[in-house]
Image (cartoon, rainbow, N blue to C red):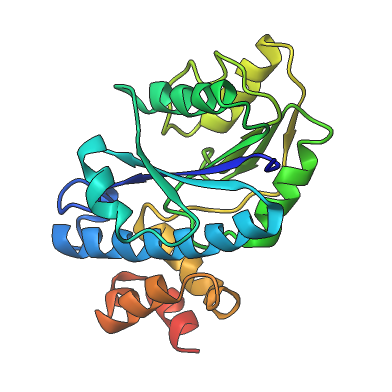
Amino acid sequence: MRRGRLVVFAKQPLSGAVKTRLTPPFSASEAAEFYACMLQDVLAVSAVAARELDLEAVLALHPGRAAMELAREAPAPFRVVAQCGMSLAERMEWAVGEAAAAAAGPVLLRGSDSPMLAPVQIGALHEALSDDAVVILPDRDGGYSLVGVAKPVRGLFEHAMSTRTVAEDTRSSAARLGLSTRLLEASFDVDTVQDLALLAEFRQELGDLCPRTLGYLDERNLWRHLEPAAQGSVSG
């Protein structure tokens, strides 16, 4: 039996539907293509982590009608499913509940806009679930890139998502449910031009994790939208 489940939450990369906080300066089509590259990188690294940790790999897509189309592009060993629920909170609750119904064990939920997460970080969060019921890998903006639950429980995500307090709100929900929680060292996701500056700052150590993401930014010269100092870190 596998040691748990790794679920990547993703959207269909449609123009005008993803990475809207990057438009402008990106065009809507550039934002969609950029997101598609990030998703490919996230899936490639997550596939490695799932094999190393003996986790079932699941790609949960929104909207659900995209599942069949993108199933052809997802790398092995991903199983592609449609997200269920109106809000992100409902869809995350569904993912945890579905894993519970399948007796899947620990469940890790990963976003699709954090291409800098390495398999070792996913492994560290999975290992931490041996001691704590909920483990969160927060982002610098108050959200999180990865959250794990040792044993699926309802009600953990019954609060507003995609806010600057979502990591703390999730920890508060866990406390209300009597669950021990651990926060790991913060990372970052890519939503804004400021996040691109962080990507530029760390690009030398990120090359193997997100080659498609960096390659797309290079190809389209989208680094030009950064401040001069950040642009220097790209070329230097």
**Which residue is drawn at the image coordinates 54% and 59% (left, top)?**
47
User: How many numbered marks appear?
Assistant: 0
What residue is at 60 percent from the left and 76 percent from the top? Answer: 205
Q: Is residue 27 visible?
A: no
Instruction: Report the residue that reaches farthest toward the right.
Output: 131
Q: Look at the picture and state if 222 lies above or below 13.
A: below
| Closer to us: 71 or 85 | 71
- Residue 199: x percent and y percent? 48, 67
Task: Answer left or right for 112 relative to 222.
Answer: right
Q: Would residue 11 appear left or right of 102 to someone viewing this image?
A: left
Where is 103 relative to 69, above or below? above
x and y, in percent, of residue 48 in the image: 59, 63
* Residue found at x 73% / y 18%: 179
Report the front residue among 188 and 53: 53
Vertical arrangement, residue 186 with respect to residue 177, above or below: below
Position in image of residue 19 (x %, y %): 28, 51
Q: Return the x and y of residue 202 as percentages of the image width and height.
A: 56, 72
Q: Residue furthest front?
A: 1
Which of the 4 image quarters holds residue 118? bottom right
Outermost residue, bottom direction? 236
| 47 left or right, relative to 94 | right
Which residue is located at x 20 percent, y 65 percent? 30
Residue 201 visible here: yes
Q: Quadrant where the N terminus lies?
A: top right
